[in-house]
Amino acid sequence: MGEADDGSKSKRVVFVTVGTTCFDSLVRAVDTQEVREALFKKGYTHLVIQMGRGSYIPTKSTGEDGSLSVDYFTFSSSIAEFLKSASLVISHAGSGSIFETLRLRKPLTVVVNEDLMDNHQSELAEELAERKHLFCARPQTLYETISAMDLILL
Amino acid sequence: MDFCFSLCPQKEVYSCDLCLYAYLIPLRRQRPSPRPPLPATILIIFRLLPKIHKVFGMENRDGSFFSDMGCINASILLIIGASTLIVIRIFYIIYRSSKPLYSTPPGPLSTLIVLGSGGHTAEMLNLLAVMQMERFKPRYYIAAATDNMSLQKARALEDSLMQKSEVGLVGTSHFMQIYRSREVGQSYITSVGTTLIALTHALWLMIKIRPQVILCNGPGTCIPLCVIAFFFKAFGIRWSSIFYVESIARVRRLSLSGLLLYKLRMADQLFVQWPQLKSKYPRANYVGAEKVGNFLHHDLTNFQPMNSQNLTNFCCHFTFSGFFQVANSQYWTFDEMQVANQLAVYSLDKT
């Protein structure tokens, strides 16, 4: 990855996507203070959340006070653009999002939605995590995963 | 009777009306046809009917009680016979289903494509993009009535096909919607009614389409259609080959619809994309990445983390849409190509 380039120093974006689903617990987990700080500590400057059909509204922040800048939207036709500009993607476990991100060669952390009835999505995420293509987390373990995350392992 | 049997291998036997064997000979002669002639089986029952009746009637001519008994016996015999025939027919279909249907390449086959929703539709359309469409025409797309996106995407794919190829080569495409048997969160009591409506609707669509190939990859939308296709096979209305491609998201367990089609042996071929599934369900066809070449085995041990080529290859390997990026790569054949090829093998020809 060309993250050490001069351009990426100023802006390193974390893109959170939930696809077309409703996945409030992920948005809420990302919105917590500790996760934000962990991301900021890792050198990320911007947090963009695609929140889909969820009802939980994250708090916006301009990031002027030397913290993570936070922005969100519900849906966009240019998800691919957001993925391309991101330095880290935090995604729901849908196969479409997973493979689209991997194809763009972006570091990926997948958060499995445990509220779903028939939770087959975790199968794919866990299998690919075992093969070291991505990190797999739950909403409540997102903080630990992010702070322990070492992108060299991917 | 002796006269009959002695003549049976000859043609004269057709004229012999007394010998039961005569009814079996024509059946054997018709073997070369790919499916057993169902009308012939029905014909046999009907032609044997008076004979059975006569046998019982003659034995018990002297008392009305015995005559009644004869009738009852005859009807029991008839029911047993009919159900045996049905069971044999079903077993035959199950046996026949997993075999290639034609020995020579037939003309284009009418194809029914069931679009699930969301990720299922995306996978299906990616698969269609690498299939030889001129062999599968006309194409009928079916999506759930509540699913607006899938048919739009299918239309876009068909439009791009039309632009790319000559007129008439890819054939026509038709788009339809089907009622769903159960919406998310619907109560079980009302879903009995909606399931019946959905089945009737599926039956109506299937009567209209009568496809030769059914291509589906879940979720439940495809089940009523597949069940009806199976009954069409059983009743000799239409022989449709059912192909089910399990989603890449299924690693350890088949989805419910996949499991149903596998266990009931309704799908002619079931494709899985992970080796774990293949070992668990041996009758499934494995079309994932690891079988082809030793790409994964090799690279898992010394996998270059952000080596662009590796990761692109890997993703191409696992996803359908990446196919064209490395289409000329010499490393391996692709999962989607394998599926497409195998589809061609099982539905079209042996080569």
Image (cartoon, rainbow, N blue to C red):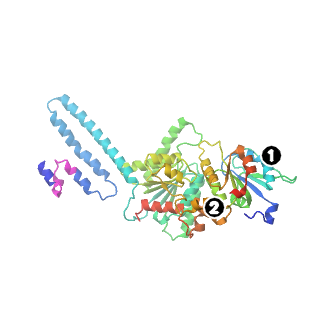
Please, which residue is most extreme toward the left here?
Answer: B3
Query: Which of the image's four quarters has the C terminus of chain B?
Result: bottom left
| Residue A70 visible | no
Circle 1 is placed at which residue position? Answer: A33
**Secondary structure type for disc 1:** helix
Reply yes or no: does residue B240 show up in magenta.
no
Which amino acid lies under the numbered mark 1 shown in the image of this protein? Gln
Q: Which residues are magenta?
A: B8-23
Asked whether disc 2 touches disc 1, contact meaning CB atoms under 8 Å apart, the reply is: no
The location of residue A139, given as percent across then percent down, is 70, 45
Does residue B239 appear anywhere in the picture? Answer: yes
| Residue B100 in the figure: left or right of residue B22 | right
Q: Is residue A136 above or below residue B64?
A: below
Look at mark 2 in the image and give the residue it sits on.
B302
Q: Is residue B317 left or right of residue A146?
A: left
Crowdedness near tag 2: few (<14), some (14–19) or many (≥20) residues, C-alpha within 10 Å: few
- Residue B27 is situated, as x and y percent measured from the top left of the image, at 26, 53
Q: Are marks 2 and 1 on the same chain?
A: no
Queried whether the magenta region covers residue B9, the answer comes back as yes
Tell me which amino acid carries mark 2.
Asn
The residue tagged with tag 2: helix, strand or loop?
A: loop
